[in-house]
Amino acid sequence: RNVFHGSSARLCESIAEEGFNLPKDMHEKVGKFGNAVYLSNHVSSANQHLQAVLGRVRSLLVCDVCPGQSCVSVEDFAALEPDSTAWEGLELEQLRKAGFDSIFVCSGSQREEYAVFDPRLVLPRHIVYVG
């Protein structure tokens, strides 16, 4: 399935060469669903994460994703992992313990987003440079 990932031009180029790393591995801030790679099926959602770098155009990645078993709501995860009260600290081990590989969020207007906790499930295919 083709999805988009927005980031700085430098990171997009690094990801295209070396693959994805999780935010904590790069000493970056984790997203609202925890330490995961965030992807969207809409360019406009990924575009929100584009960062301009002086002297370089912005860019985003077109990727293939195999999300595995996706948790589709907070309730799904809470039912299996009742001690978890916050998504922010979520890690792959917790998600797998609950039987999931990723989180799937449908935010209306056919916008879909994935939080994928195993970066090996995401394959960067193309870099799109935005002027």
Image (tube, helix red, strand yellow):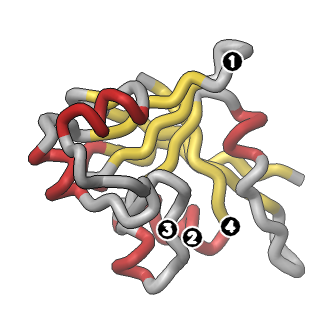
* Residue type (three-letter) at the residue carrying disc 3: Val
User: Which of the two labelled residues, at mark 4 and mark 3, occupies the earlier sequence position?
Assistant: 4
- State the residue position of label 4: 9
Q: Nearer the viewer, residue 94 or 70?
A: 94
- Tell me, yes or no, whether the two marked residues, 2 and 1, touch with CB atoms within 8 Å: no
- State the residue position of label 1: 108
Looking at the rendered image, the disc whose residue lies closer to the viewer, 4 or 1, is: 1
Q: Tell me the element at label 1.
A: loop
Name which residue lies at 22% across and 30% down. 68
Q: Is residue 84 left or right of residue 104?
A: left
Q: Quadrant of residue 4?
A: top right
* Residue type (three-letter) at the residue carrying disc 1: Gly
Q: Which mark is residue 30?
A: 3
User: Which of the two labelled residues, at mark 1 and mark 3, occupies the earlier sequence position?
Assistant: 3
- State the residue position of label 2: 11
- Tell me, yes or no, whether the two marked residues, 4 and 3, touch with CB atoms within 8 Å: no
- Crowding at mark 1 (Cα within 10 Å: few <14, some 14-19, many 20+): few
Q: Is residue 113 left or right of residue 59?
A: left
